[in-house]
Image: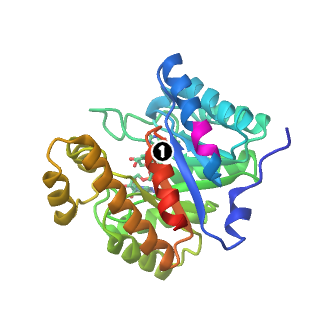
């Protein structure tokens, strides 16, 4: 199979790209479910799919396996994620080399979430400490890799200020990242402000909005607590009004995400990245809604 096209070439076509994020399942039953999801999603033809990587390398083999599966069985352009936390430079390089040998040319380069309770200073083994270090390492190995990095419209939770976080984001772009995918957000104004500030700081790469359709108040409260994204009161009221009926909450979540995506594309976003949690339904419903 030939090597993948760099995603930067797809962005250069100037049309909005749709990407979907999977996580590597824990067992064979989960992998079978993922196969069914992937088969259902083939019909909407995502421009690329990404596969998360457990911080610390806990999913090293599973991320590689699922990435190969999505690429070889379904023909998707795959962007595996790769994180630095608790890994040496040699360990991270070995994972990247294995992807490269398979023909993968796109990687999401990240520091990774710190394991619970670990101090930032103890989680890094030999100097591979920030997302920018991962970008530099990977491009040193293979300058033709296309790298995405994470961006935080509402500030990374550990950053002392928005300005400091922007300076650090620019380090990743200056190190050679081709595009930024944002942390999930529910208020588009946060994204527009973020893009304006990135542009003013001299970052010209595509900034892809990350969207997650809400499935339950409990789930979304846990996720937003962790990543620092704010939940608009209007969205909370709608979810509360749905009571404990999952299908209504799902409909509310899809409706909100659809309105977000329509507005983002109308206002020139370079596409959208869906955090689909290995489920096909929301992505398919959104694709149908956007086709209207
Ligand atoms: C699109 C996307 C996908 C993700 N996928 C995964 C995944 O698969 N697996 C996973 O574990 N996590 C994932 N995450 C979460 C991510 O790993 C965490 O948000 C993590 O805490 C930060 O990673 P980063 O690469 O953005 O970090 P960095 O860019 O390194 O930033 C981390 C913090 O350090 C600061 N910083 C950066 N550089 C410097 C510097 N030189 N000096 C001082 N401070 C600095 C930043 O301001 C920020 O506060 C993802 C996040 C996003 C947005």
Query: Residue placed farthest to the bottom in the image?
Result: 200
The correct choice, above or below, for 232 with respect to 223 in the image is below
Task: Determine which quarter of the picture holds residue 252.
Answer: bottom left
Horizontally, residue 190 falls left or right of residue 110, namely left
Residue 212 appearing in the image: yes
Q: How many marks?
A: 1
Q: Is residue 249 above or below residue 116?
A: below
Residue 185 seen in the current view: no
Q: Which residue is drawn at 51% across and 27% down?
A: 33
Residue 47 in the image: state x and y as whole percent: 65, 55
Secondary element under disc 1, as helix, strand or loop, is loop
Q: Is residue 31 left or right of residue 5?
A: left
Farthest residue in the front direction?
292
Residue 109 in the image, given as x and y percentages of width and height: 56, 48
Location of mark 1 (residue): 129
The residue that appears at 54% across and 49% down in the rendered structure is 20
Relative image position of residue 201 (x, y in whole percent): 48, 78
Specify the quadrant that holds the N terminus.
Answer: top right
Whether label 1 lies within 8 Å of ligand 1 gets the answer yes
Q: Between 288 and 9, which is closer to the camera in this rendering?
A: 288
Residue at (71, 36) in percent of width and height:
99
Q: In this view, does 173 lie to the left or right of 247?
A: right
Q: Give the range drawn in magenta.
A: 38-42
């Amino acid at each position: 199979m030939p090597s993948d096209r760099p995603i930067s070439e797809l962005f250069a076509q100037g049309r909005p790209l749709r990407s979907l994020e999977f996580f590597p399942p824990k067992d064979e039953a989960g992998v079978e479910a993922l196969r069914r999801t992937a088969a259902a999603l083939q019909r909407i033809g995502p421009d690329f799919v990404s596969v998360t990587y457990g911080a610390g390398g806990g999913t090293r083999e599973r991320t590689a396996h699922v990435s190969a599966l999505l690429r070889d069985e379904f023909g998707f352009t795959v962007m595996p994620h790769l994180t630095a936390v608790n890994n040496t430079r040699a360990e991270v390089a070995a994972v990247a080399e294995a992807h490269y040998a398979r023909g993968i040319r796109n990687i999401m380069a990240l520091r990774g979430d710190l394991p619970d309770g670990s101090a930032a200073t103890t989680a890094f083994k030999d100097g591979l400490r920030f997302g920018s270090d991962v970008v530099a390492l990977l491009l040193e190995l293979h300058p033709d890799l296309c790298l995405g990095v994470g961006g935080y419209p509402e500030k990374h939770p550990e950053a002392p200020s928005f300005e400091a976080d922007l300076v650090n984001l620019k380090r990743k772009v200056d190190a050679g990242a081709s595009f930024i995918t944002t942390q999930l957000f529910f208020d588009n104004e946060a994204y527009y402000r973020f893009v304006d500030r990135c542009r003013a700081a001299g970052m010209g790469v595509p900034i892809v909005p990350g969207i997650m359709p809400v499935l339950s108040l409990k789930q979304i409260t846990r996720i937003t607590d962790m990543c620092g994204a704010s939940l608009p009161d209007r969205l909370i009221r709608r979810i509360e009004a749905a009571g404990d009926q999952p299908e209504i909450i799902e409909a509310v979540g899809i409706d909100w995400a659809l309105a977000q995506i329509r507005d983002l594309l109308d206002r020139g976003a370079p596409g959208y990245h869906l955090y689909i949690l290995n489920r096909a339904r929301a992505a398919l419903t959104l694709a149908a809604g956007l086709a209207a």
